Amino acid sequence: MNLSGPIDFRPKLISALRHYSMEKFKSDLVAGIVVGIVALPLAIAFGIASGVSPTVGLITAIIGGFIVSAAGGCSVQIGGPTGAFIVIVYNIISNFGLEGLAVATFMAGLILVALGCFRLGTVIKFIPYPIVVGFTAGIALTIFSTQINDFLGLGLRNVPGEFIPKWGMYLSNLSNVNLTTLAVGVASLLIIILTPKVSRRLPGALIAIIIVSTAVYFIPGVSVETIGDRFGSLPTDIPQPHGFELNMATINRLLPSAFTIAILGAIESLLSSTVADGVTGSHTNSNTELIGQGMANIVVPFFGGIPVTGAIARTMTNITNGGRTPVAGIIHAIVLFVIFLFLMPLINLVPMSCLAAVLIVVSYNMSGWRTIRGIFHNPKSDISVLILTFLLTVIFDLTIAIEMGLLLAVILFLRRVMENTEIKVYSDQLDIADGSETTLHEVLNVNPGVEVYEIDGPFFFGVATKFDEMMRTTLGSKPRVRIIRMRKVPFIDSTAIHNLEMLIKSSHEEDIHVVLSGVKENVRESLTKAGIDSLLGPGHICDHITKAVEMANKLAPASSVTTTSQSIA
């Protein structure tokens, strides 16, 4: 990973257009139209569930989807609003208003661009899988809980944002269920579920919206709340760009939310592109993808939009319908724009319970319950991370869930590294090939008064403490020389260097020599910068254990060293 190299920004659109053909355009055109149709109900539903109007959801899909395809690093990625952002967007609007959301989204875009410019695209992919599964499942349950009011037709206003109080209000108002609204929701749900059994190419959500909206409009006596009833007549003009206030006080208040949007967007986009690469055989430029996602999130807030990221379901729809270049994503944005200009009056007729059914299916697909069941067969540490992230997402919010989940994962990772880092103690004889695959074993005689410690693994703060404790517990009579064998130490951190410095100083006070053996070049460079070489004395850092033992045997008063060789079959 090179943080100081040139910016890795190579949009896939540019390379795709170099060898573009009419045949590719036909495939992209069909895929783009299909994805645009599929994206329509999702963009509307995600916008409403996030606490904004359907228009905002569509504007986000149009502008954000265009920029992601034009500037991203994945050939088939479809960008737009997604279910993963519903919870965080809703909370930001509740606490900071629409302008706060605009500022947070803008800062998240800057963070994403910075991640891409510093070539951190591959690092994002290494976020532990249990964390991703945990907060995705938590988001799914939260989305489901936000749709119960509209699905059952409870007619509640000012529903609490917190999970437990929200369900408390639902349960105390079950007697207010509107049977007509519930019937419309159940019918929508059945259509969405059964449509793929007829044809997987048919967008179940759109079919449900068309059939149910038509039925509600033409059947006499059916009265349910629609989008038009709640939001009024929807505008058909692209909003004029507008600014927002950005100062240090605002940045400090919204930076945690912006960080959450950026990390969540990066994870979802790169997961989507990884899945797409596995299907198409293409290769996503992760850094360019992050820069493209960042650019979309920088621009969208000026038009009142919500956060943009790669959408796995829409990306897979693009692939299965023949899309293979970013042109398909651009066509998808154009299709949505045409619908926005000419068909918005029809959107007013869509029942809210129908949209609730769409989001209930989305939440079920997001839940990943089969994956969760599989993770419960994994080590307890993975299960702990999953459960903690899930509960924090549901009970508190996504910002805390991601931060605590990452913290716990890092702690558990460090513990595993510490457990796998061995510290061995040798006396009398030392087999220099011990721990290697060679069949030629050379055994060195170690004089009395010489202790050999071997560190097998990274030498960082946790291991440094473990090493100090082991030395205290294994010391018998005071030695004359301590050899620390470091052939298997890939890196050393400042805490380990400090502990090593303290060990050397305390050993010198007791007239004990310290010799280092097998130090790798990068580790030796760190030790030299810290002045450890001068503290040890000339020649006390050896490149091989044979030289270290030879020096130690000379420093310790004993007979001369002897060496034997044995060939092990």
Image: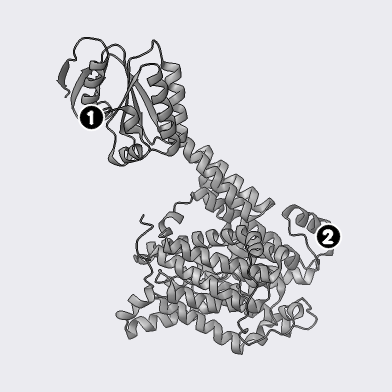
Q: Give the secondary structure at mark 1.
A: loop
Percent across and percent down for residue 564 are 16, 17
Ranked by sequence position, the earlier of labels 2 and 1 is: 2
Q: Is residue 52 visible?
A: yes
Q: Amino acid at mark 2?
A: Asn
Q: Amino acid at mark 1?
A: His
Q: Quadrant of residue 49?
A: bottom right
Q: Quadrant of residue 418?
A: top left
Q: Nearer the viewer, residue 441 or 318?
A: 441
Q: Residues within 10 Å of mark 2 (few under 14, many from 20)?
A: some
Label 1 sits on residue: 544
Q: Residues within 10 Å of mark 1 (few under 14, many from 20)?
A: some
Q: Quadrant of residue 511?
A: top left
Q: Nearer the viewer, residue 5 or 269?
A: 5
- Residue 173's disc is 2
Q: How many marks?
A: 2
Circle 2 or circle 1, nearest the eye: 1
